[in-house]
Image (tube, rainbow, N blue to C red):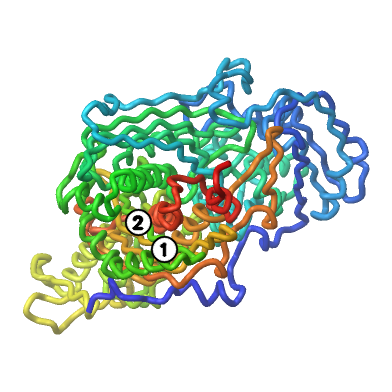
Amino acid sequence: MSILGNKVVRREDPRFLTGGGTYVENLKLDRPAYLVYVRSILAHARITGVDTEEAKAAPGVLGVFTGAEVTEALGLAPNVFPMFPAEMRRPYVAADVARYVGQPLVAVLAESRAAAVDAAELVLVDYEELPVVIDLEASATDEVVLFPDHGTNVLNRMSSEHQADFSGAEVVVAERIVNQRLTGAPIEPRAGAAWWTDDGRLIHWSACQGAHPTRDLLATVYGLEPAQVQVVVPDVGGGFGAKSRTYPEELALAWYARQLGRPVKWTETRSENVAAMPQGRGQIQYARLGGTRDGKITAYQLDVFQDAGAYPIIGAILAGMTQRMLTGVYEIANCGFNGTAVVTNKVSTTAYRGAGRPEATVAIERMIDRYAAEIGMDPAEVRRINLVPRFTQPYTTGIGTQYDSGDYPAALEMVLDKAGYAELRAEQARRRADGSTELLGIGLGVYVEITAGGPGGEFGSIELLPGGRMRVTSGATPAGQGHDTTWAMLVSEYTGVAMDDIEVIHGDTDAVDRGGLTVGSRSVQLAGSALVDAAGILIEKARNRAADQLEAALGDVVFDVEAGRFHVVGSPVPALGWADLAADAPEPLIAGTDFSAPMPTFPSGAHLAVVLVDTETGRVRLDRMVAVDDAGTIINPLLAEGQVHGGLAQGVAQALYEQIVYDESGNLLTSNFMDYMIVSATEMPSYEVHHIETPTWVNPLGAKGVGESGTIGSIPAVYNAVIDAVSHLGVRHLETPLSPERVWAALQPME
């Protein structure tokens, strides 16, 4: 009987729940030095002097290194993408100019973290303040230029081949939509440890989302062959995209270790994490949507400004992903897009759960509701009229993106049915008629997103061990997704070996041949497919060995997967199990392969949020969250639901609570969890999660990604629900997060 599709409990959980996890911070090292950074207190300033003498003399201090010293030794960090301007490369430690509050200026290393913190407070930095640019649109004017040698703050401009033509639209609506900056707030902040072996190898432990890309980056920085670097990624306490790259302040650990001749450990504090770990979103959108008065969309245009922060990394290109997913689940041939990415005096932006796709969904889904309100039509009906019909072969959107498969109408109808949409509308009308001060709002978010959208494939291998056990190695690096359970399920399914007899190895470049980044919800469809292919290769090798031992022709030997045994066709006895084939074998049986897909996959779904809005205080309470998600073939529904649960929480948080705020001088005003309103279980209802399956033809599993779906669908659903609750009072649009203050202010009478 197949194990796939069953709710198999995560086998990682017992050790996590009983303190058995292994993290960089609890790595035991011989005589480590602890690193603390002195960080800039200004958003834009020339560094005119650094006095480290008192810090060097402090108890327990092993070394103090200025930006000038580090830069002289290491130069500037490599650009994440070659097309980024060379003038905008980030220093490991700033030597001349600080460009955001929290940028490292001096490295202090000591016998203990406490001693390093104390010494860091003794460092004196002299600044010459420079003009600050925080606003994206102001940055695009180049009145304040962050990199004078480059001459402009604009990193790139992108435009679709055609722009939308609104000449035939009977109704046109327009809005300015803000996707505010967010921080990933992983339970484990960034952490690293590095040391050199006697034979000159670099060993680096990192809490990141890809061991092999970090190894290759370190090899580049230090002029080493990749084989001279070992990167180990142990258990990782959350990443959400922010740990997808290893950043300059961690890449420099090996240089400090070389100077001191001992291991160096670094774990940032929570306040450092909020201020200095790259953030997500940061996109301003100007959206226009036109259509007929009977609900048919005829034109859609989206123009965006993307905040890259002070130094361009992943965030600088995410407007391209927004363009790619421009029209969402709708048939809109007449569409256009323009995007401008700019630098600002804030920490860099990077991938954050969804990375460009939530922004696209927020725009189109908000405009659908805005259009529905304008023409007086139910927003669910507008969606019905414009949805792409079910398809199982490639479909090309108006902006030119090719989708693999999907059934958007089925997802919409299911979420409406599961939520009891008609009854909710009746309850809404009753509250309005009764003059209730607690109004009910209903919001929809019908979405499609792209997963495994980046280049490259993934590696997996399976090795037969003595006794018939199996060892699985995967190039995918987990950060809480449940890879150990999923990989064991897949290998058990195809080989017949019990899950308990399958060990899984990942996150160690010495133990795993190669691997990519665990980003973009790519793991099951790429790494899982690699293991499926590897299992097929291993079984063929085993058939050859079984044929020799059974003294039979290869073509006559079959594999009974349920029994996990090889025998001659039509004669189940004698038979050889995996343990038999492993015994006295001249060489181990092992199969490794890389899997690359011909195109990305496009998960989809429909979310419905029900909110209660207190008109006297502006307080919003999320009452229900109904989610229907289509991730193709589901390997383990329990793990898939866990991913959706986490995604929903982060989407709700963006809509209602979380926001990174800088003042006009570039000071971070939301520097801790007292000011940055991170969502908790208290604010969340019990989710109602459902699935439909439209398998993809792109990989042998038929699987699409599910790690970001919850976020992408829930943001517009909650957003629309709040506006819907108060729309009869004249409110047409608000900015997120939809705080009580914002909602209350919108309800006050105009003077």
Q: Earlier in the sequence, mark 2 or mark 1?
A: 1
**According to the image, label 1 marks what residue?**
432
Which residue ends up furthest to the bottom in the rendered image?
573
Q: Is residue 352 left or right of residue 644?
A: right
Tell whether 155 sits left or right of 51.
Answer: left
Q: Is residue 474 visible?
A: no
- Horizontal and vertical percent position of residue 75: 65, 27
User: Can residue 43 be seen in the rendering of this structure?
Assistant: yes
Q: Position of residue 65 (x, y in %)?
A: 79, 36
Decide: few, some or many residues near mark 1? Use Cα within 10 Å; few <14, some 14-19, many ≥20: some
The image shows residue 365, relative to residue 436, as above or below, that is above
Q: Residue at x 24, y 38 (%)?
A: 291
Residue 444 circle label: 2
Count the labels in the image.
Answer: 2
Q: Is residue 65 left or right of residue 743?
A: right
Q: Secondary structure at mark 1?
A: helix
Q: CA distance from mark 2 to mark 1?
A: 20 Å
Quarter occupied by residue 157: top left
The answer to whether 595 is drawn above or below residue 546 in the figure is above
Circle 2: is it few (<14), some (14-19), or many (20+) Cα within 10 Å? many
- Label 2 or label 1, whichever lies nearer to me, is 1
Q: Amino acid at mark 2?
A: Leu
Give the structural element (helix, strand or loop) at label 2.
strand
Q: Nearer the viewer, residue 309 or 679?
A: 679
Q: Which of the labelled discs sits on residue 446, or is there none?
A: none
Residue at 45% in and 55% down: 726
Q: Which amino acid, by three-letter code, is at mark 1?
A: Arg
What residue is shown at x 28% (from left), y 28% (from top)? 164
